Image (spheres, grey):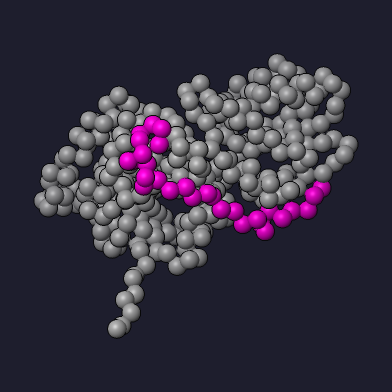
Amino acid sequence: MSRIVQPWPRIAFVMSQFPEMHETFIAREMTQLREKGIQYRIFSLKPCKDKIIHPESERLLLHTRYENFFFSREIWESALWFLTHRPWRLISNPGIAVRWLWKEPVGLAKTLLVYPKLLAYARQIQGWGATHIHSHWATVPTTCAYMLWRLTDIPYSFTAHAWDIFLADSMLPEKLRKSTGVLTCTSYNKKYLWESYGRELVEKVHVCYHGLDTASFDLPRRTSLERPLLFSIGRLVPQKGYMDLLEACSRLRDRGLDFECAIVGGGPLKREIEGRIRDLQLQSHVQLLGPTPQAEIKNLLSRSTVFVLPSVVAPNGDRDGIPNVILEAMAAG
């Protein structure tokens, strides 16, 4: 009997923005899939506006597709094709989004805004011969994967990471129900989904921890005994707990300890954190370095005495899973 060889899948990845500077874990996953011979294309819902693009992400730009929001010939040709061949699916998708998301106007507005470009992406995915659709983040990208499934009949799955699980999304049960499977990066996430939506839906959720090439973080140790460096990386958002870090730095200073603290990352709390640094008179101890290239982050890791990330549960319920920067700091010793 001749052996039946199953063809490798062709995966269409849907992402809110690719590349995204602080989503190095996704770039690593994409790189590994490419090295394993998996064929895929990345369909980005937004153009990349980051000033810093890590080398790993830059290599994947060749496999990334972008589309205008409204005004492109391909969008209107795709709309005409679906109007001719699948009119009900074309028209009903926005109605389904309104039905599920009317209590979440921001998510609904984002979904309706990108819907025209989804029509172009749907035709591209069909033309390329994709056999599966996978989205990163359970929010708008997965809503889009759901709509692409309805337009094309190509099955979809998604990866749920952290905030996209813990913040309200009234459509998440429907997206879980219709997907072929779900990945998440911690057992805590799976337990939370189980408690929130029941065993029946969560049976298809699989825990898949983020990987890391530890050899790339085997760095020389260059710590200073005279002025220890406390180092932290993360977006300037409530769940990272930076206000607690500043309070800790204030106490160290009051005990007469000389040290420096470097925080890498940008975000909406930048001005508030800067103000707190001034209030606590920590200007000579704490630096906000902003978004930083990976090479400089590794330099800071090699110099740091302590890596610290005092994560908390934010007032809106948002929280961290297993931050990848902790894995990187552990790999760096």
- On screen, 225 above or below 123? above
- On screen, 90 above or below 275? below
The residue at the point 51 percent across, 42 percent down is 186
Q: Residue furthest right?
A: 226
**Can residue 212 be found in the magenta stretch?**
yes
Q: Is residue 199 visible?
A: yes
Q: Is residue 110 visible?
A: no
Instruction: Tell me where the magenta segment starts and ends, as one range.
Output: 194-222
- On screen, 318 above or below 116? above
In the rendered image, residue 189, in percent from the top left (x then y), is placed at 47, 38
Answer left or right for 274 relative to 219.
left
The residue at the point 75 percent across, 38 percent down is 306
Decide which of 66, 2 is in the foreground and name it: 2
- On screen, 282 above or below 211? above
The residue at the point 25 percent across, 58 percent down is 126
Q: Quadrant of the N terminus?
A: bottom left
Q: Residue furthest bottom?
A: 1
**Can residue 195 be found in the magenta stretch?**
yes
Decide which of 66, 32 is in the foreground and name it: 32
Answer left or right for 279 relative to 102.
right
Residue 305, quarter of picture: top right
In the rendered image, residue 15, in percent from the top left (x then y), is placed at 40, 46
In the rendered image, residue 193, in percent from the top left (x then y), is placed at 41, 36
